[in-house]
Amino acid sequence: MVFIIYLLIGLYAVLTGIAGVNQWKEEGLRLRTVMFVIVSIGIFIILVLPNKDWMLSLLIIAFVLLHILAIAEGLQKFGRLNYRHHIIRCIFHCIIVLLVYIFIK
């Protein structure tokens, strides 16, 4: 089960990083785009931490940062928020953090 959790988190980081790089190519260098890529790389670094308490804390911070960046992106691009998208995303992040707490810590 631990392997599956690491795989889900890693896949999520890869997909977020790829989306950030594609947006970087399309729209040019912007702070939010760079932050998406940095947070994605940070998630990979977090996964190799030997201290599980730090891992859990830093993953929570990384997911909160991703939420803030996604909200800022939605407001800037569309002028409004897609609440369903953000609620589903928040639920996914909460499930991942809960799984990390239960199985990895």
Image: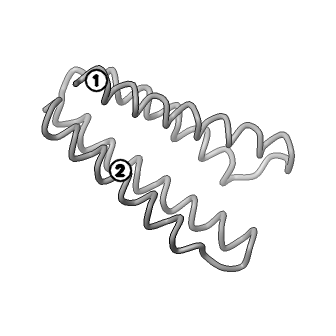
Q: Secondary structure at mark 2?
A: helix
Q: Which kind of residue does numbered mark 2 sit on?
A: Ile
Relative to 30, is 47 on the left or the right? left
Badge 1: residue crowd in 10 Å (few <14, some 14–19, many ≥20): few
- Label of residue 49 in the image: 1
Residue marked by disc 2: 61
Residue at 22% in and 20% down? 50
- Mark 1 or 2, nearer chain start: 1
Q: Which kind of residue does numbered mark 1 sit on?
A: Leu
Please report contact status of discs 1 and 2: CB closer than 8 Å, yes or no: no
Check the image and report above or below for 31 versus 52: below
Alpha carbon separation for disc pair 1 and 2: 15 Å
Q: How is the image coloured?
A: one colour
Give the position of the C terminus as an image quadrant.
Answer: top left
Estimate the x, y position of residue 4 in percent, counting from the top left. Answer: 32, 25
Give the position of the N terminus as an image quadrant.
Answer: top left
Relative to 88, is 72 on the left or the right? right
Estimate the x, y position of residue 88 in percent, counting from the top left. Answer: 44, 61
Residue placed most toward the observer, 35 or 95:
95
Estimate the x, y position of residue 52 in percent, counting from the top left. Answer: 18, 30
